[in-house]
Amino acid sequence: MNTFADGLGVGLSAGGIGGGLATGGSMPAGGGDEASLKNEKLDNFLRNKLASGTGSSTPMNVIVQTIDGLKPEDKRMVESLGGKVKDDLYIIRAFSAELTIKAIDMMILSPRVTRIFLDSEVHAVDER
């Protein structure tokens, strides 16, 4: 159980979440330790949710940006983590998905993933 998806080139150490990254020798920009990956790749809400450890098995709607948009390996990775890809957001090289906080913690280890945001409703404010 060292790899969470076949053929992705991304693996985890036997330690599970927060384990090592096996990408054939290349590390993501910014160093690659778990703390720097969380700071680089997660929005504040998700970073705080991971730190608190609450609701780790409750699925959340997120937007996952990748280096070049949704690819079959991204869908396989999401599904292998128990999640579901909802929409291809090709204009912003991203996709929306339903993932648990544990799955999000694993997703940041992928060198393909550049950012993960909470997918929430946005409201305009009229300050006239």
Image (cartoon, rainbow, N blue to C red):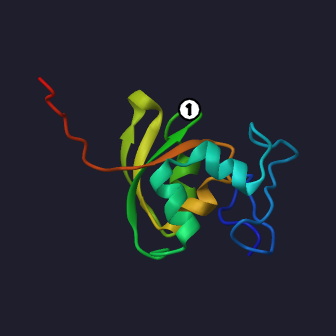
In the picture, which quadrant includes the N terminus? bottom right
Of the pair 124 and 78, the residue shown nearer to us: 124
65 lies left or right of 62: right
Q: Residues within 10 Å of mark 1 (few under 14, many from 20)?
A: few
Give the image location of residue 22, x and y in percent: 81, 55
Query: Type of residue at label 1?
Result: Asp
24 lies left or right of 80: right
Q: Is residue 18 above or below residue 117?
A: below
Helix, strand or loop at label 1? It is loop
Q: Is residue 70 above or below residue 77?
A: above
The residue depicted at 88 percent of the width and 45 percent of the height is 25
Farthest top residue?
Answer: 128
The residue depicted at 41 percent of the width and 32 percent of the height is 90
Is residue 78 visible in the rendered image? The answer is no
The residue depicted at 83 percent of the width and 41 percent of the height is 26
Q: According to the image, label 1 marks what residue? A: 68
Give the image location of residue 91, x and y in percent: 39, 28
Give the image location of residue 116, x and y in percent: 50, 47
